Amino acid sequence: MKNNHIINSGFNFGIHPYSIEDFIHDIDKSNTVDGKPIYYWCNIKNAEIPHDAAYVALINCSNINVNNLTLINNYPGLLLVNSTNCIIKQNNILNNFLDSPFGYGVFLLYSSNNFIEYNNILNQETGISNVESTNNTIIGNNISECDSGIWRNFYNIIRDNNLFNNYKGLDYNCNSVIEGNKIYSNNCGMGSGYGENTITDNDIFDNFEGIGYIGENNLISNNNIFNNNYGINNYYGNYNIIIKNNIISNSEYGIHLYSCKENCIYHNNFINNTQNAKDGGYDNYWDDGKHGNYWSDYEEKYPNAKKKPFKGIWDTPYEIEGWDSKDNYPLIKQWPDSRTITITRNIVTFNYLFHWFLERFPILQKILNFLTI
């Protein structure tokens, strides 16, 4: 392509071919969009995209800086294919969809170890899409008015972003670190997931679902989850560890489990939710065998309960709607902030079985109470 001039429209390259060779083209900056050049770079290293760019694609590139640009009405807004160690920083990436259901603000294909930082990404079908792209760091971006804010996160770091007014803030996550984000005013703050993510230190609020389907083997800890309809609405997600979260003022449920098993839920603070919890799964653990969760309505539900001396727990289990689930060791006071994770699933399982024996042989509980006073 040489000397083509696009007026009152964007550069619609498309991203449907998935072979790297399909992206190798000779498209130079003699092509323009509204008088600004197209930078379609192949096999370039150690360079910076000029600030007059109308469209940017990096194919087989490395160590490229793409900073302080405004990319509007293209498809996709910014394209990286088989490119590494690039920095995408402080750009305005807007309206890159052209009425397409596959419009992307930033589209990464087979690209790794890139940094996408402090950009404003607005009004795309998908804000940032990672297809077969891993070990990218997505930090400090404002992403809004997208169907999916950040989509297909496999082995990526997603930190300190603002994800708001999207249908889903985060969608399809696997083996990623998701921390320190503000996720709010979405239909679903965090949606479909494959699992094995670390989800920590996020503020998740004013969504319909704060955290929806998340897959299996996730660690969800130290998050503030508040003012959603459902704080956590976990369906079909097994073997997750949900600990040390503040789950507050959610209008339907603080946490709702559906058709899921062997989730560990303890050391959380459930405060002023319309209904704190419902367990529609099975074999889920609501304590670690020593301490459970704090429930703000506990004293109202159990006015005759007694405090166990020196243990910080009540003597009456907190019953949870569902399959005869209960927190056997409800906390008297809120669980303090902590970032130390020391209890493994094996310890939880052992303590659960130990409690099962104590229930069936009350004399053992009496002996234990005598020894621990």
Image (spheres, helix red, strand yellow):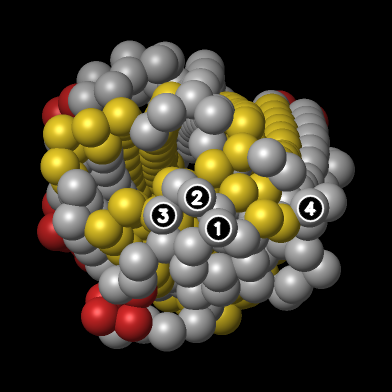
Q: Amino acid at mark 2?
A: Ser
Residue pictured at 54% horizontal, 29% vertical: 52
| Residue denoted by label 1 | 3
Give the CA separation, mark 1 to mark 4: 13 Å
The residue located at (22%, 25%) in the rendering is 340
- What's the residue type where badge 3 is placed? Asp
Name the quadrant containing residue 356: bottom left
Comes first in the chain, label 1 or label 3: 1
Instruction: Residue at 60% x, 49% y: name it.
Output: 32
Residue 96, percent across and down? Answer: 69, 54
Which structural element holds mark 3?
loop
Viewer-closest of 51 and 137: 51
Q: CA distance from mark 4 to mark 3?
A: 17 Å
Residue identifier under label 4: 7
User: Which residue occupies 62% across, 32% down?
Assistant: 70
Of the image marks 4 and 2, the number of the one nearer the N terminus: 4
Residue of label 2: 30
